[in-house]
């Protein structure tokens, strides 16, 4: 929406989720504002109310009036594995997640520096795993420099930042991995070929 005013919210029985480019574009009277939840897009991260709101809205699209709280949380965690740049796209991503198998308890994937030949799960989209690895390695670079603000802007949660700070990785391999991952992201080449290159980097003694 270019701007959200009282008339955009009043008279609707269903829940509504609007996006504007800046808080100043939410032009609501005090009474309507008091009944309206407002989230900053920058604060949509794992465990946030905004993430759960997206999943609940997606549940409504599917006709699920009262989604299970644990299902909402697990789905939101999966949704926020990547940074949310477009709320509308995130809603339909959540719809897609909700129509698939029920998300189970999160199990951390093995890393290429600990198990070079077994870090790519067989039941996960290779591109999804590569993007996750890319985010972890960029987060590690920020953690290495103790730059919590940059890590937060990149979408690294405080818990992950703390975990990454405990790692001691070979920086030459980190940068080589980031180089190949960046090329893959730009060129949109075969993710399995990129995964093989990453494996080679970390299994070489």
Image (cartoon, grey):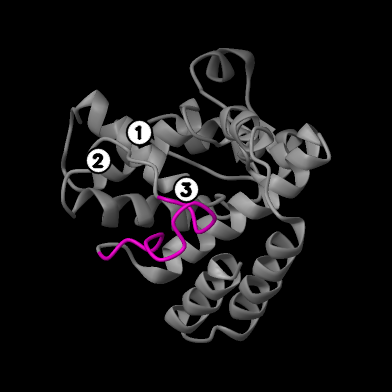
120 is within the stretch colored magenta: yes
Of labels 1 and 3, earlier in sequence is: 1
Give the main secondary structure of the magenta stretch. loop
Residue 60, label in figure:
2
Q: Where is residue 36 drawn, in percent x and y?
A: 51, 22
Q: Is residue 56 above or below residue 129?
A: above
Q: Please give left or right for residue 7 compared with residue 205 in the image.
A: left
Residue 93, visible in the rendered structure = yes
What is the C-alpha distance between the residues marked 1 and 3? Answer: 25 Å
Q: Which residue is mark 1?
A: 15
Q: State which region is magenta.
A: 110-122
Q: Is residue 69 above or below residue 60?
A: above
Q: Secondary structure at mark 1?
A: loop
> In the image shown, does 18 or 43 lie closer to the viewer?
43
Residues at discs 1 and 2 in contact (Cβ within 8 Å):
yes
Q: Where is residue 129 drawn, in percent x and y?
A: 44, 61
Of labels 1 and 2, earlier in sequence is: 1
Q: Secondary structure at mark 2?
A: helix
Residues at discs 1 and 3 in contact (Cβ within 8 Å):
no
Which-is-in-front pick, marks 2 and 3? Answer: 3
Residues at discs 2 and 3 in contact (Cβ within 8 Å):
no
Q: Secondary structure at mark 3?
A: loop
Q: Residues within 10 Å of mark 2 (few under 14, many from 20)?
A: some
Of labels 2 and 3, earlier in sequence is: 2
Q: Please give left or right for residue 184 compared with residue 170 in the image.
A: left
Q: Where is residue 102 drawn, in percent x and y?
A: 17, 44
93 is within the stretch colored magenta: no
Q: What residue appears at the point 75 percent right and 49 percent down from the top-left corner?
A: 141
Q: Quarter holding the C terminus?
A: bottom right
Q: Is residue 191 above or below residue 57?
A: below
Q: Which residue is mark 3?
A: 81
Which-is-in-front pick, marks 1 and 2? Answer: 2
């Amino acid at each position: 929406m270019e701007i959200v005013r009282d008339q955009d919210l009043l008279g609707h029985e269903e829940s509504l989720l609007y996006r504007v480019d800046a808080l100043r574009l939410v032009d609501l009277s005090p009474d309507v504002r008091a009944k309206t939840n407002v989230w900053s897009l920058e604060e949509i991260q794992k465990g946030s109310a905004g993430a759960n709101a997206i999943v609940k809205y997606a549940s409504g699209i599917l006709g699920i009036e009262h989604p299970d709280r644990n299902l909402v949380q697990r789905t939101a965690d999966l949704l926020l594995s990547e940074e949310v740049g477009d709320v509308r796209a995130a809603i339909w991503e959540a719809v897609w997640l909700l129509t698939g198998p029920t998300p189970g308890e999160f199990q951390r994937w093995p890393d290429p520096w600990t198990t070079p030949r077994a870090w790519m799960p067989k039941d996960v989209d290779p591109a999804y795993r590569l993007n996750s690895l890319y985010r972890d390695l960029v987060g590690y670079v920020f953690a290495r420099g103790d730059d919590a603000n940059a890590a937060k802007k990149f979408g690294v949660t405080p818990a992950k930042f703390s975990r990454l700070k405990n790692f001691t990785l070979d920086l030459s391999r980190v940068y080589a991995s980031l180089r190949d991952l960046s090329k893959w992201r730009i060129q949109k080449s075969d993710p399995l070929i990129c995964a093989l290159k990453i494996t080679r980097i970390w299994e070489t003694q």
